[in-house]
Image: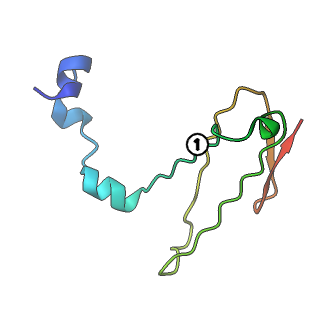
């Protein structure tokens, strides 16, 4: 019995995302960066994170990237469409 059917009591046919794990990996890649293992000097200051990517082919038009930042501090992020800054 599939997990969704057993745990959520929802039929697999209804709840299936219709995408395989291999397709998900190819079409929707995810990257995780753990910055918790840093010097004690840096832990009480702002951590500057820059992500630069190079692609072997042109990125399709309207491609979007999202970032999830998990922090123990309350921050406000502001973006101009190119860069994202933290407002304190």
Please give left or right for residue 55 compared with residue 69 in the image: left
Q: Residue at x 20, y 26 (%)?
A: 3
Q: How was the colour assigned to the protein in this rendering?
A: rainbow
State the quadrant of the N terminus: top left
Nearest the viewer among 45 and 16 is: 45
- Tell me residue 73's x, y (percent): 76, 27
Q: Quadrant of residue 87?
A: top right
Rendered position, 59 above or below 1: below
- Tell me residue 67's x, y (percent): 62, 47
- Tell me residue 8's x, y (percent): 26, 19
* Furthest-right residue in this view: 88
For label 1, the SS is loop
Please give left or right for residue 45 compared with residue 8 in the image: right
> Number of numbered discs present?
1
Q: Residue at x 72, y 52 (%)?
A: 49
Rendered position, 60 above or below 36: below
């Amino acid at each position: 019995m599939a997990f969704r059917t057993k745990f959520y009591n929802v039929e697999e046919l209804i709840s299936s995302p219709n995408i395989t794990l291999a397709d998900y990996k190819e079409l929707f890649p995810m990257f995780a960066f753990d910055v918790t293992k840093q010097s004690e000097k840096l832990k009480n200051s702002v951590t500057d994170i820059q992500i630069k990517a190079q692609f072997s082919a042109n990125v399709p038009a309207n491609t979007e990237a999202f970032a999830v930042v998990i922090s123990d501090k309350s921050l406000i992020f502001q973006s101009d469409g190119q860069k994202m800054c933290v407002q304190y």
